[in-house]
């Protein structure tokens, strides 16, 4: 995120080569919150399994916000990105459905969710946090000391894309159910037509030729 585009309310994603550093990063974020240097609504350590699933290993949350991690922005984000396939809304191109982990993907659509997902690679341990910060300096310094690279995206952008992704998922489910119903009805109609056609064919075979 360019400096001139910095926003106070952000979702950060940080990947680490060492698992222990991710847990240390979580503790350091909590310390920054306690000192008032940043505000933390929720933060989690996550691991992406080989099948693409995001697994939460440890978490902290703002105690004044009920159910922050499980029901807040971080929880919703994990819900959207938690599978090997993601449903993303990207700019004016509409809904993108496909693998989020293909480095050869040529789609250039800007998407906060896609960027965050791609930063959490299979087999790696990372930190996701919903934070309020006056500048990126405090968090960036802490993460750099732990060997982490910070990806920062506006919380408003993430929130909007999560909402759009959830709507896309609902629409996809509705469309899938409709197609299943249509397929079932077509199969039933074909079976009924076949049953009706069979006795008619038998009758036609037993009809006597008309007298000349």
Image (cartoon, grey):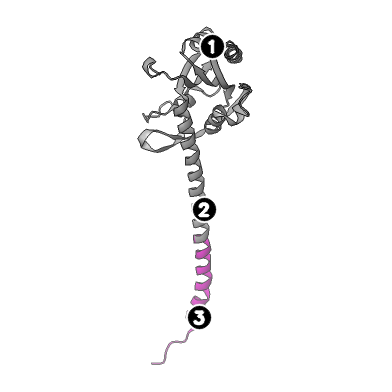
The mark nearer the N terminus, 3 or 1, is 1
- Give the Cα distance between marks 2 and 3: 35 Å
Please state the total of marks drawn on the protein image.
Answer: 3
Residue occupying image coordinates x 53% and y 70% = 195
Q: Which residue matches tag 1?
A: 37
In the structure shown, which secondary structural element does the residue marked by tag 3 occupy?
helix
Q: Which residue matches tag 3?
A: 203
Q: Which residues are magenta?
A: 186-212
Labels 3 & 1 near each other (Cβ < 8 A): no
Residue 123 lies within the magenta run? no
Instruction: Please determine whether, in this image, residue 65 is positioned above or below residue 88.
Output: above
Give percent across and percent down for residue 163.
49, 36
Residue 211 lies within the magenta run? yes
In the structure shown, which secondary structural element does the residue marked by tag 2 occupy?
helix
Q: From the viewer's side, name the closer residue of 141 and 61.
A: 61
Q: From the viewer's side, name the closer residue of 150 and 19.
A: 150
Q: Which residue matches tag 2?
A: 180
Q: Is residue 125 visible?
A: no
Q: Nearer the viewer, mark 2 or mark 1?
A: 1
The mark nearer the N terminus, 2 or 1, is 1
Labels 2 & 3 near each other (Cβ < 8 A): no
The mark nearer the N terminus, 2 or 3, is 2
Residue occupying image coordinates x 53% and y 14% = 38
Residue at the limit of the structure toward the bottom, as seen here: 212
Q: Is residue 38 visible?
A: yes
Which circle marks residue 82 in the picture? none
């Amino acid at each position: 995120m360019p400096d001139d585009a910095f926003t106070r309310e952000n979702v950060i994603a940080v990947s680490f080569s060492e698992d222990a550093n991710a847990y240390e990063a979580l503790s350091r974020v909590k310390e920054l919150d306690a000192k008032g240097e940043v505000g933390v609504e929720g933060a989690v350590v996550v691991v992406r399994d080989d099948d693409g699933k995001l697994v939460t290993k440890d978490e902290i949350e703002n105690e004044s916000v009920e159910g922050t991690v499980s029901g807040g922005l971080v929880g919703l984000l994990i819900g959207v990105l938690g599978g090997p396939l993601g449903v993303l809304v990207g700019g004016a191109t509409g809904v993108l459905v496909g693998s989020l982990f293909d480095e050869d993907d040529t789609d250039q659509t800007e998407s906060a969710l896609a960027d965050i997902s791609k930063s959490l690679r299979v087999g790696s341990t990372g930190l996701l946090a919903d934070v309020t910060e006056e500048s990126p300096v405090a968090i960036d310094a802490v993460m750099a000391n732990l060997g982490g690279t910070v990806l920062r995206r506006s919380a408003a952008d993430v929130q909007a894309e999560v909402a759009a992704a959830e709507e896309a998922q609902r629409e996809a489910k509705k469309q899938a159910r409709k197609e299943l119903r249509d397929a079932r009805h077509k199969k039933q109609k074909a079976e009924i037509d076949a049953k009706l056609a069979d006795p008619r064919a038998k009758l036609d075979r037993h009809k006597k030729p008309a007298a000349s």
